[in-house]
Image (cartoon, rainbow, N blue to C red):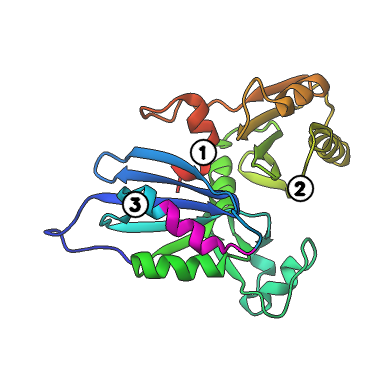
Amino acid sequence: MWQNTNVINKMYQKLAIQVSLNGLSYAIFDTLMNKPLTMENIPIGRVSPTAKIEDLFTEAFQNYPEIKSSFDEVVIIHSNNLSTFVPTALFDEEYLGSYLQFNTKVFETDFFAFDTLEKYEMNNVYIPYVNLNNYFIDQFGSFDYKHANSILIEKLLDISKNNDERKMFVHVSDTHFEIVVIRNQKLELYNSFDYKTPEDFIYYILFTAEQLHLNPESFKLELLGKIDLESPLYNIAYKYVRNTSLMDVSTIYNSFSEAKNREHFILLHA
């Protein structure tokens, strides 16, 4: 990670960019006040099957020139479902690909990375978007990068302190969602599922609950990410799980709406 340590030239601003194959979101933070100043979501549509994602990101940079300003710190967040968590006691940096092969197809040419969650004695092994990292090197020089689920899991574990009740969190993205079950800063389950319909969504939630012996009449389900009260995903979850709610983000203090804070929960905690 590169950081500007020259006090005279410090901008006291940090840029966080969350990238996926569907687009990017970014937030600019005031590091003195420790709060976001600007946050935008930039969807990217492929104009042709041969269009390169890097070229589409170039267009986004041209339309939002503020992300080409100078920053003391730049963090790139890779958002995909190509990740898995490994306890530190079982972790060996020499065998990253072997951990992922249990839940995703890996190739010899894949590049593997990992984030260390030292406080919780585990590592998140994942496949980053190498082509996008190369693109951002041209834009920013050096930067730090991590996986979206590293941020998500660490923050959910933080807020579960002193809560002995098992709780299921579901973080929703455009094409996949993560199920996280936590009790008092202990990660009991993490998994990621692709979905196309609300029926896919509730099937995996109920199946996971059944495997963990969680009663839909009593366990608490909190939803965050790209979801609101009008979403078909929320409606079907509420129909089958009695204690369904949107995650309370009222403790995130900024000028954005609760809906926006819930959707960009990961970005805001980068």
- What is the distance, in whole Å, between disc 3 and disc 2 at their CAs? 31 Å
| Of callouts 2 and 1, the N-terminal one | 2
Image vertical order of residue 93 relative to residue 73, above or below: below
The residue at 87%/42% (across/down) is 211
Is residue 54 in the magenta section? yes
Give the mark toward the camera: 2 or 1.
Answer: 2
Return the mark for residue 216.
none
Q: What is the secondary structure assignment of the residue under circle 2?
A: strand
Q: Residues within 10 Å of mark 2 (few under 14, many from 20)?
A: some
Q: Are marks 3 and 2 in contact (CB under 8 Å)?
A: no
Image vertical order of residue 245 relative to residue 52, above or below: above
Q: Residue 164's spot in the image, x, y percent? A: 66, 33
Residue segment shown in magenta = 50-60
Mark 3 residue type: Ile
Mark 2 residue type: Asp
Instruction: From the image, tell me which residue sits under label 1.
Output: 265
Q: Residue 37's spot in the image, x, y percent? A: 31, 38
- What is the distance, in whole Å, between disc 2 and disc 1 at their CAs? 20 Å
- What is the distance, in whole Å, between disc 1 and disc 3 at their CAs? 20 Å
Give the mark toward the camera: 1 or 3.
Answer: 3
The quadrant of the rendering that contains the N terminus is bottom left
Instruction: From the image, tell me which residue sits under label 2.
Output: 194
Q: Residues within 10 Å of mark 1 (few under 14, many from 20)?
A: many
Q: Residue 70's spot in the image, x, y percent? A: 25, 57
- State the image quarter where residue 38 is shown: top left
Return the mark for residue 67.
3
Give the mark toward the camera: 3 or 2.
Answer: 3
- State the image quarter where residue 138 is shown: bottom left
Which residue sits furthest front? 48
The residue at 83%/23% (across/down) is 240
Q: What is the secondary structure assignment of the residue under circle 3?
A: helix
